[in-house]
Image: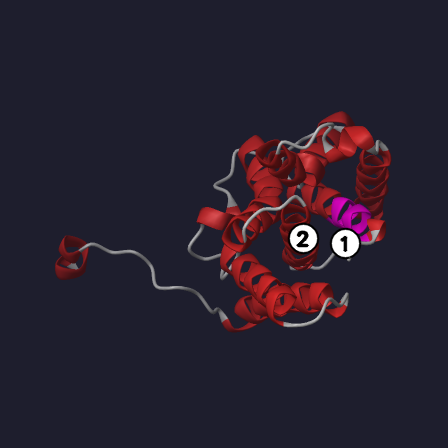
Amino acid sequence: MIMPAWIEYFAVAVCAITAVLAAEGKGMDLFGVLVLALVTAVGGGTIRDLCLGVRPLFWIAEPMHVWTALVAAAATFVLVRFTHLPHRALAVADAFGLALFGIAGTEKALVFGSPGIVAILLGVVTGVAGGILRDVLRSEIPWVFKPDVNLYATAVFVGALVFVLLREWLPPSETHRYIGMAVILLIRLAAMRWKLRLPTFRSRIQTNSR
């Protein structure tokens, strides 16, 4: 099954929006915000394509991805100057970006002949790498490394795993793609709502000293 083009375009737009929301309070001008948005929107897919040896990169082959990111970022930049968005808007938008790009990356890796586990890992990279670049550029610890950001990359891993297993065990269906996205989104939103997280690493010395 061929992935519909709208999924990657929508993912690019959502990730660009998250970058604008994340730039709040950083004193960036419009140009800086657009650069941040573009890096966030295409960063994960770029790393995925480089790992797969895909040439040209997806946003070079289809420059409309660049325009989509820039237009979404500019529109959000204008919107937030006149409207106060909820505090959780960034986290919710980011969750949608994780779901869309996570499965898009996994599926593209499978199309290029990657083994299931490799496809899953590339799905995780596609989902989280743009956000990592975004946070590094705004001098923040990336969300994927923060213990208080619950089930971030884990959600992508589980959703991508479900998608790969469905493709291997069941007849081909576009439904598998959307089930994988739903799993990622629901896990991430549930983790945000109920503070679900994996155990935090502590050495024996740290545990005894508490």
Per the rendered image, the range of residues in magenta is 7-14
Pointer 1 and pointer 2: residues touching (CB < 8 Å)? no
Image side of residue 67 versus residue 144, left or right: right
Residue for point 80% across, 50% down: 10
* Quadrant of the rendering where the C terminus is positioned: bottom left
Q: How is the image coloured?
A: secondary structure
Residue for point 71% across, 63% down: 177
Inspect the image, locate mark 2, and give the three-letter code of the amino acid beneath it. Answer: Glu
Whether the magenta-drawn stretch holds residue 172 is answered as no
Most common secondary structure along the magenta stretch: helix
* Quadrant of the rendering where the N terminus is positioned: bottom right
Residue for point 63% across, 52% down: 106
What crowding class fits label 2: few (fewer than 14 Cα within 10 Å), some (14-19), or many (20 or more)? many
x, y percent for residue 192 = 56, 66
x, y percent for residue 76 = 81, 45
Using the numbered discs, state the Cα–Cα distance from disc 1 to disc 2 in whole angstroms: 36 Å
Inspect the image, locate mark 1, and give the three-letter code of the amino acid beneath it. Answer: His
Closest to the observer, 115 or 80 = 115
Whether the magenta-drawn stretch holds residue 12 is answered as yes
Between discs 1 and 2, the one toward the N terminus: 1
**Residue 153 against residue 16 in the figure, above or below:** below
Residue position for label 1: 84
x, y percent for residue 12 = 76, 44
Say which mark, if any, is on residue 107.
2
